[in-house]
Image: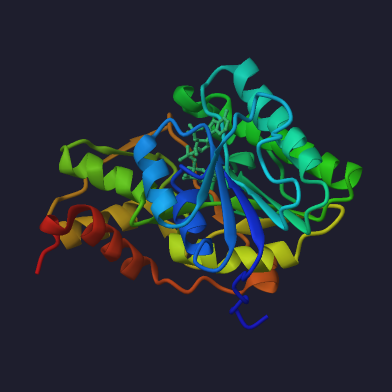
Amino acid sequence: MDGAPQPLQGAKVVVTGVTGQVAEPLACALARDNEVYGAARFHDPDARRRLESAGVRCVAFDLSAGEPSELPADADYVLNFAVAKTNDWDVDLQANCGGVAWLMEHHREARAFLHCSSTAVYKPMGHHVFAETDPLGDNHGVWRFLRTYSICKIAAEATARWAARRFELPTTIVRLSVPYGDGGGWPAVHLHMMINGSAIPVHVDAPSVYHPLHERDIARMVPAFLDAASVPATVVNWGGDAAVSIEEWCTYLGELTGIEARFEPTEHTIDSVQLDLTRMHEIAGRSAVDWKDGMRQMVAARHGELLKG
Ligand SMILES: NC(=O)c1ccc[n+]([C@@H]2O[C@H](COP(=O)([O-])OP(=O)(O)OC[C@H]3O[C@@H](n4cnc5c(N)ncnc54)[C@H](OP(=O)(O)O)[C@@H]3O)[C@@H](O)[C@H]2O)c1
């Protein structure tokens, strides 16, 4: 694969979680050449306005409400980026697992279904480089404010695998690392902490390594993942080609802004999740946005006044 997936054109596409960090820029990019239905509860009316002005048709739906009959059942493609993170086990299991099952049943005639998972499904194993077949575990359980997250992401993957077979719906499950861009993301949270003078928690087993993936690469790679959808479901790691640590990206954000990053090593934060990207390369090629360029653009978009020079 030459790393240049063909963009989607003229398709009817449903994007759930459309007000979220990852799906909003993706839906706006897709709406240039496709009929895009963006689904969420729309707790954020500003996000709805931004989406509508980008040409996205907004449809209110709740993952935990049963069959999503508001959504067009004749969609060609469905991209599920919705995630419930209330920290309540009953609510989050119902929304993230039952919600995926209802969504896949409703869209059983689609050409492909993409379910967004997370590298938070992997069992913490220090500096191990994770392939898709590696052990799963409660990666994010160490964060009490996200205690349901990893287990719900694992359970949602299991639901999507079952539904792909049950409905013969070609499916790809992507395990996303650290998405970021002008719209935000974990590096943007760190920048905010640096501005406020807060120390950045990093794992004691330094450095804390991930694969930041820019929002433009996310939009560019989605069509290839849809092409790779299959029964049983395709499962693939999804991250930027560069393995970059929190220590490195915060130090770089400090160089850009003149604000020094302070780190607080602790056992009470998530461990590194470094990825084997072989399968992603086979399906969708390599990421194209250099991480330093992407982070500089992120600072310019969010705190342009801080950029030195
Ligand atoms: N951000 C990351 O660092 C990261 C890393 C790895 C993987 N991921 C995965 O990427 C995907 C997108 O994440 P994100 O960070 O963009 O999420 P996010 O910003 O937290 O947004 C979550 C989205 O889901 C919607 N939602 C929540 N509960 C819902 C419900 N009950 N019914 C319908 N919609 C609901 C929210 O809109 P309303 O509240 O308006 O309904 C929102 O649009 C998720 O699968 C996540 O696990 C994210």
Residue at image point 49% right, 66% down? 32
Render colour scheme: rainbow
Q: Quadrant of the N terminus?
A: bottom right
Is residue 231 in view? yes
Can you give x and y, in whole percent of width and height, for residue 17 in the image? 54, 41
Classify residue 181 by image quadrant: bottom left
In the displayed structure image, the side of residue 2 where residue 161 appears, left or right = right
Q: Residue at x 16, y 43 (%)?
A: 195
Quick check: 230 above or below 271?
A: below
Which residue shows up at 59% across the image and 79% down it? 4
Query: Which residue lies most toward the bottom here?
Result: 2
List x then y, in percent, for residue 190: 29, 44
- Front residue of 71/143: it is 71
Instruction: Looking at the picture, tell me which residue is in the foreground, 202 or 301.
Output: 301
- Left or right for 17, reference 116: left
Can I make out residue 138 in this image? no
> Is 174 left, or right, of 56 in this rendering?
right
**212, above or below 217, in the image:** above
Residue 125 is situated, as x and y percent measured from the top left of the image, at 60, 43
Q: Is residue 129 above or below residue 120?
A: below
Locate the C terminus and report the quarter of the image it occupies. Answer: bottom left
Q: Which residue shows up at 38% across the image and 36% down it?
A: 45
Total label count?
A: 0
Question: Between 164 and 185, which is closer to the camera in this rendering?
Answer: 164
